[in-house]
Image (spheres, coloured by chain):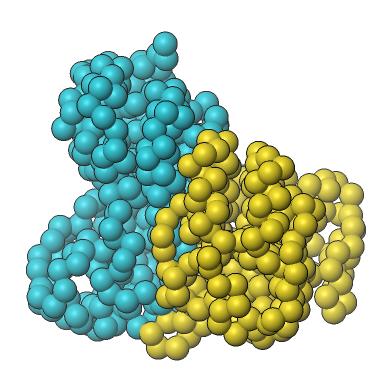
Chain colours: A yellow, B cyan
Amino acid sequence: MVNLMHGNLNAQSSQPDKVDIYLHPLFKHCDDNFIKTLGTISRKITCEKGQTLLFRGDKAVFFYLIRSGCVKLYRETIDGTLAVVDILTAGQVFCEISIFEKCHHPYNAEVVEAGEVIMIPVELLQEEIKNNHQFALDVLRLVANHCRQQERELEHRSLQNAAQRIGCFFLRLLNRREGEGGTFHLPYDKMLVASRLGMQPETFSRALAKLKKETGIHIKGSKIKVDNISNIAKYTCSACSSEFPCKDLDFSKGR
Amino acid sequence: MVNLMHGNLNAQSSQPDKVDIYLHPLFKHCDDNFIKTLGTISRKITCEKGQTLLFRGDKAVFFYLIRSGCVKLYRETIDGTLAVVDILTAGQVFCEISIFEKCHHPYNAEVVEAGEVIMIPVELLQEEIKNNHQFALDVLRLVANHCRQQERELEHRSLQNAAQRIGCFFLRLLNRREGEGGTFHLPYDKMLVASRLGMQPETFSRALAKLKKETGIHIKGSKIKVDNISNIAKYTCSACSSEFPCKDLDFSKGR
């Protein structure tokens, strides 16, 4: 039996329920019995800001599903620079590769906004992948969708300027609400958005000012008001090979 | 039965043999019978430079394995700029997502160096994935490995300068030959290397000159002579979170 209280995890934990597990579409083809077992063996833990959930190089024993709060995945280069791999919020998952491959964590995971995280022992999922063909295909789709998102990001690093890349980040938050405008909050701190997009803080600030000027959006703290989404789409998506709204948002909660 | 002569494919084709199919480790857990069927139903086609193998948006009906030559995967942005997704050489594959998901091609594929390509109907592989659990896991590993390589590239776009990114490209060609030096040829034209790395030709030329100065490599046409690999590794890998030699090269032929 795996030890759920390893590392410096907070001892506050409970059993996740069905609603917690079904939060992620990955489990949509798993039957009630399996979900019940998952609920019994997995743990839902309360995390504080700054808490490290896992260290790069450690053996992967859990699959993680974020119930609330915000988690940063990152690595450090040999000369000590921080490389942010991703920043994930409620409904998103990480360590999916450990479901089908014995591996060591390729990144560190740190809580950047307090919340709850569900830790599911990968042993259980490795069994399910053998017994449930549909689950195996769903894991494949999750990984493939992640691949597609990375492909898009790589394309943007070559073809879009910094302001357009922030525009794309905003469009994906506004997700599919074509035409009309709307108000939304940044999912996490502005400096974290900058690091997620691989930008220095000063580059990010300059690019945000440019995006405001080009598209007429209003920014107040973490609140972004957009009068017409098409303005951002026109400015941003002209330098992208996808059309707005992006098709890869279908499985967006799967990272 | 799928029509193998669609699009503007060259009519010169033959049956691939066992050696062709086993060229890729993806098929290592498939039995002889299945490989025999693959050999009968698949086609090995002779491709000319400039030939388009598939168009973005077309329904995916084949999985492709490159026997020789060189294939460019690319997209175009709405404003007409070319975005190179990847450039693949002998032993590499593409359209792996179509093995487990009905999809339309997310890119165009064009032959940039004449050679032979094996086209395997995805219907066959979709059947095998249902019947052969180990094959399903191997497809997962192929996609996951691709994911890891993209993750590394994304990290490099943020943290490495252009010369370091070319250095990394060279190191991966020298693959695992630690310490000692060596001579190798670029797998394709210099301008294609630039586009593969998402660089403008002039950026690439400047960065290549810088890499030469920093690491003492010798370049003559497509021939690169390296006296000591450690010099490139020291210069390049200091701005990367992986250590040389990279672990993700294990499944390198799988893209």
Total labels drawn = 0
Residue B188 in view (yes/no): yes
Up/down of A243 relative to A85, above or below: above
The quarter of the displayed image where residue A33 is located: top right
Q: Does residue B14 appear to the left or right of A115 in the view shown?
A: left
Residue located farthest toward the top when viewing the structure as drawn = B1
Up/down of B65 relative to A44, above or below: above
Residue A45 locus on image (x, y percent) = 71, 73
- Residue at (63% x, 65% y) in the render: A119
- Residue at (54% x, 45% y) in the render: A128
The quarter of the displayed image where residue B62 is located: top left
The quarter of the displayed image where residue B68 is located: top left
Residue B207 in view (yes/no): no
- Residue at (26% x, 39% y) in the render: B28
Up/down of B27 relative to B14, above or below: below
Residue A233 locus on image (x, y percent) = 74, 52
- Residue at (36% x, 17% y) in the render: B4
Task: Name the one closer to the observer, A42 or A183.
Answer: A42
Task: Name the one closer to the observer, B193 or B106.
Answer: B106
Position of the C terminus of chain A by quadrant: bottom right
Q: Does residue A76 appear to the left or right of B103 in the view shown?
A: left
Residue A148 locus on image (x, y percent) = 54, 49
Task: Name the one closer to the observer, B160 or A233.
Answer: B160
